[in-house]
Amino acid sequence: ESYSAIDLGGACLVDIGGWDSNRLQAARFRLLRDQTWFPWEYFGVINGQKFKTLDDLAPRYSQACGLAHSWMEMDSKSRELLIQNLTALYRQGTPSLLQPSTDDELIPWYRAYMLKGPAHSIDYLPHDNRNELVLSRTKIDSAWLLEQLKLKRNWDSLDVAFTEVDDTAWTNPNVPWDIVRLNVESTHITDSSLESFAKMPRLIELDLSNCEITDAGLRSLAGNKTLRTLWLAGTGVTDQALEILLSMPRLEALQVHGSKISEDGWQRLIKKLPRLKANSTGP
């Protein structure tokens, strides 16, 4: 799942792992976005049989993938220790010693690895089979986004929440972004970006939570035929935007808590769009 290859014409670039690998995105989401960490004292000693019986398998599996990536990319000694540990864990049911091996050492080291991306001086060569990026809480800005992703503007999912990204990443008419799920929560996005978002032909999920969005800006999304999920939590959107929301034929999930939409306005919206009830949160 972390294997990718690029035909360079006469040569083939093979990449196993790397900051943009598919499995690493889920691990980065769990740690940086959800702030989830399972203490190593208990997590590191669970064998395969026990692992499969856990109720919270998905986040644990993500952490396991993230740690495996990080140890494999450290140095040859770390790779050898990881292989020895997995062999002991799955064959004998008891782990061997990995380093770092305590939370005090492991968490800062693991977080630093998760925050790693391509260096500014290195051109990023995107893979066709790597279409999701979780960059939430990383130290990126619009300049980084425009430069590092210049060879790939189409993504199934792009998460830049809680970063320094602003409108300049999206408003350049010469940058044709095509994103299916976009998260810009708590960034410096304003109404200026919404016209560009509206032009994305496959956009089905958009998180604008805690951005400087108003009714005027939201008009750019009026009649949008692809949006299914929209987050407006913590924005300046009011009851004046209800007609805009009603004009979106495929909208089925809406989050408006912390916005300026009133309870009365919300109830009127739900009455007209009952399909929102199951997956939405009102004021």
Image (spheres, rainbow, N blue to C red):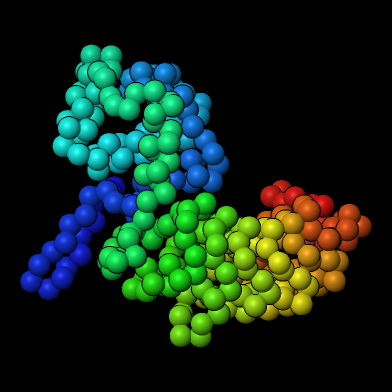
Q: In the image, is 274 to the left or to the right of 203? A: right
- Which residue lies most toward the bottom here? 173
Which of 106/213 is in front?
106
Q: In the image, is 172 to the left or to the right of 151? A: right
Residue at 33% over, 59% down: 118
How far across and how far down the image is residue 102, in percent?
Answer: 39, 23
Which of 245/8 is in front?
8
Residue at 37% over, 51% down: 116
Residue at 38% over, 61% down: 131
State how many labels appear: 0
How far across and how far down the image is residue 203, in percent?
Answer: 55, 68
In the displayed structure, 105 sits above or below 167; it is above
Which of 33/248 is in front?
33
- Which residue lies most toward the left here? 10
In the displayed structure, 76 sits above or below 233; it is above
In the displayed structure, 21 sits above or below 54; it is below
* Residue 246 seen in this snapshot: no
* Residue 168 seen in this snapshot: yes
Which of 155/209 is in front?
209
- Which residue lies most toward the right here? 264
